[in-house]
Image (spheres, rainbow, N blue to C red):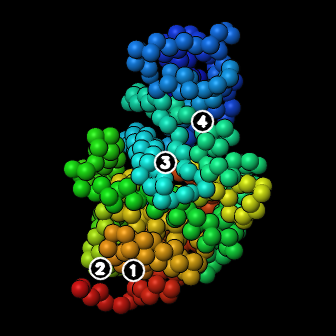
Amino acid sequence: MSDICTDDKILKQFEDILRQETNGRYEIHSIENITSAQQTVLLLTLTRTNLESPTFNSSESLSDIEEEIKSIRGEQLRLILRIWKGGARWWNLNCNSKDGLIRLANSEVAGYQLAYEAFEQYYKQYESKDRLAVKICIPKLLYYHSDCQDAPWAVFSFVKDMELVQHYCDNNLRKDLYFDDKFITDMVKFRKEFGFDEAHPRHGRVAVDDAQEYAMHVLETAVIPLHTIFYQTHDISKQNENFKRRIKILNANNFIGSDESIRYIDMVELYQEKLSEISSHMTIDSSLKQDEMTSIINSLQYFVQRLLVESKRVEKFPLPSVLCHLDLQPQNMILVSNQQHCKKIPQIFSILDWEESCFADPRFELLLICRKVVANRQQADCIWNAYGTFVKDYFHLEIGSLDSWLRLESVHSLLGMCMQGMDLLEGGRNPWEEKPDLVAKLKRELHRLEIDLGWDSNEDIHCE
């Protein structure tokens, strides 16, 4: 079935549900496509079918969609319809699989719900102590449909609304607010990252001079508030039933396929499995030379063994598991600025696209900020140390060395690129690189691992 037919079928399903849940009081007035890398995202504008205000019996139990309608003022309501089409994630090295789509959808829905509840809980506990200029508002899940015969889809509240922003921000900032989309569109397509110029033709990256300040804002206003709730409730007896249910869904839909959260060693074991798969598929495109790929795979076998040793170092600094987003780039944010307070970095109002949602070691979140958001080791050390100070001061824990995690990410990238070059992604997220560009990128990542992070593939492995 084509994507267009699938989308039309799902829209018809939603129209039927909307008619039932609002007693025919609302209908879809317009549909607007919103750009998304893997999924179909539609902005739906609903209008009343008559001019009479909808009435609700105070004793009746309202659905989430009816609750959203009840809360609006005016004649129109905007909602987001999300239809999942691709199941590629960082966690599975951007591969697709038959069950990957539904797993991703289940995880993302649970991630949205858990984030919504965690931020609400944080602000309730710390509002008097932590006077944030703008509180983060996570879209609310209104309806979720998952059927193995159709693409999974969900309806969320629409949060890019200035009245909603003003409700969530400090009184002193409510005037002259605007959505700062320019910060996103001004991101650079080429950036010097950890010693090499790297291209980012899709969305771009935050410019080097702004990257650390942006990353620190993400850390202070998004990551630390979110993690605080999970550090406090890492004892399952302290979690409410909603938290327990969402976490169970996240764990059931991760690549481990168990009720466990994801740790460093789990990724190393995944790399062993994927490396075995790569080694058994050595029929390679002619542009990826046999001798080059054989050398890289031999190096990867050594590096994965080194990661097993590295995992012992990480285990010396255990941390509670938290909800991870893993892609806190500006294009996944709704950002706002104030014309009277001319700050270079806008405020985060909402975090979108929870595709990578997982319950995992918090250093995975920190790692992806240190490797993908900031641009060099000095900036990465600043972010890592700031988080380490927070964890030590408030929870008396240590986070260990960044090196162990950067090495993991380099091996992760190398394996993903090898699978991309050998067409083993099973229809996963389409990369922009041509095969010759991919070889050059592989060599740059090997340089970072061997030279910058001190792993010579000719050295012997010493277990600790």
Q: Which residue is mark 1?
A: 401
* 189 versus 404 height, above or below: above
Q: Residue at x 42, y 85 (%)?
A: 455
Evaluate if marks 1 and 2 touch, with contact meaning CB atoms under 8 Å apart: yes
The crowd level at tag 1 (other Cα within 10 Å; few <14, some 14-19, many 20+) is some
Q: Closer to the N terminus: mark 4 or mark 1?
A: 4
Q: Quadrant of residue 246?
A: top left
Q: Which mark is residue 313?
A: 2
Q: Residue 174 in the image: state x and y as whole percent.
A: 69, 47
Q: Which residue is mark 4?
A: 158
Q: Closer to the N terminus: mark 1 or mark 2?
A: 2
Q: Quadrant of residue 411?
A: bottom left
Mark 4 → mark 2, Cα distance in angstroms: 44 Å
Evaluate if marks 4 and 2 touch, with contact meaning CB atoms under 8 Å apart: no
Instruction: Kindly identify the amino acid type of the residue bearing the numbered disc 2.
Output: Arg
* 142 versus 401 height, above or below: above
Instruction: Kindly identify the amino acid type of the residue bearing the numbered disc 4.
Output: Phe
Evaluate if marks 4 and 1 touch, with contact meaning CB atoms under 8 Å apart: no
Tell me the mark number nearer the camera, choosing from 4 and 2: 4
